[in-house]
Image (cartoon, rainbow, N blue to C red):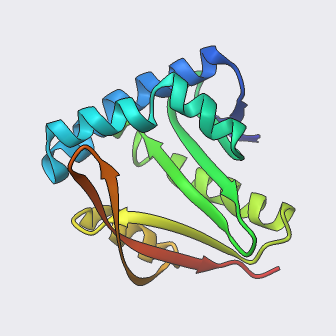
Amino acid sequence: MLFDNIKIEIANTTKDYLQIEKLADVIWREHYIPIVGKPQIDYMLEKFQSVKPITEQVKNGCAYYIINFEGVSVGYISIKKEIDALFLSKIYVLSSYRGKKIGKTAMAFVEDKVKQYKLDKIRLTVNIHNTNSIKAYEKLGFKNIGPIVADIGNGFIMDDYEMVKHIPA
């Protein structure tokens, strides 16, 4: 999908998954280490955002997309169609490319997917201490519907809020 100088393409090869792994390594370390600490990020990157788990997630119904800005891979999206919502699992952009309408374009792409799937809402989870992202989601029309705490193994938990945005047909 193309929006001016932003192109969003399905990730469906090992090469694509390796690119996502590299993007995740940079983005997550910069953004999440101050929030949850390096040991948890090391664990989560290996468990969820390396080639093997991404491959498994795709086999189990997740779709990954790489976001390119002026020909450079700058972020990625992961979504999964659920019974009554589209779960936005991941939407990340390198910090040096923020403020260029990439995130808004990516969200418009996700909203188009909601309509294609004939659903009426997007659901996501966000760390309760990730205040800038929470504010950004609220500005985009998401409502906080409450906390979710999930044990992700190795003594770590994800302490998140669930947020939902209704999309008119």
Q: Does 96 appear above or below 21?
A: below
Name above or below for residue 117 compared with residue 145: above
In percent of the image, x 76 and y 60: which residue is there? 112
Q: Where is residue 60 in the image (x, y as percent from the top left)?
A: 69, 44
Along the line of sight, the residue nearer the viewer: 59 or 92: 59
Q: For the point 54% across and 38% down, which residue is it?
A: 76
**Residue occupying the point 69% across, 19% down:** 13
Residue 96 appearing in the image: no
In the image, taking residue 84 as reference, residue 169 lies left or right, namely: right
Q: Is residue 97 left or right of residue 102?
A: left
Q: In which quarter of the image is the C terminus?
A: bottom right
Q: Nearer the viewer, residue 85 or 131?
A: 85
Observer-nearest of 51 and 70: 51
Q: Where is residue 15 in the image (x, y as percent from the top left)?
A: 61, 14
Q: Nearer the viewer, residue 66 or 72?
A: 66
Residue 162, given in percent of the width and then of the height, sits at: 44, 74
Percent across and percent down for residue 104 are 55, 57
Image quadrant in which the N terminus is located:
top right
Q: In which quarter of the image is residue 151?
A: bottom left
At x 27%, y 69%, the residue is: 128
Relative to 30, 21 lies left or right: right
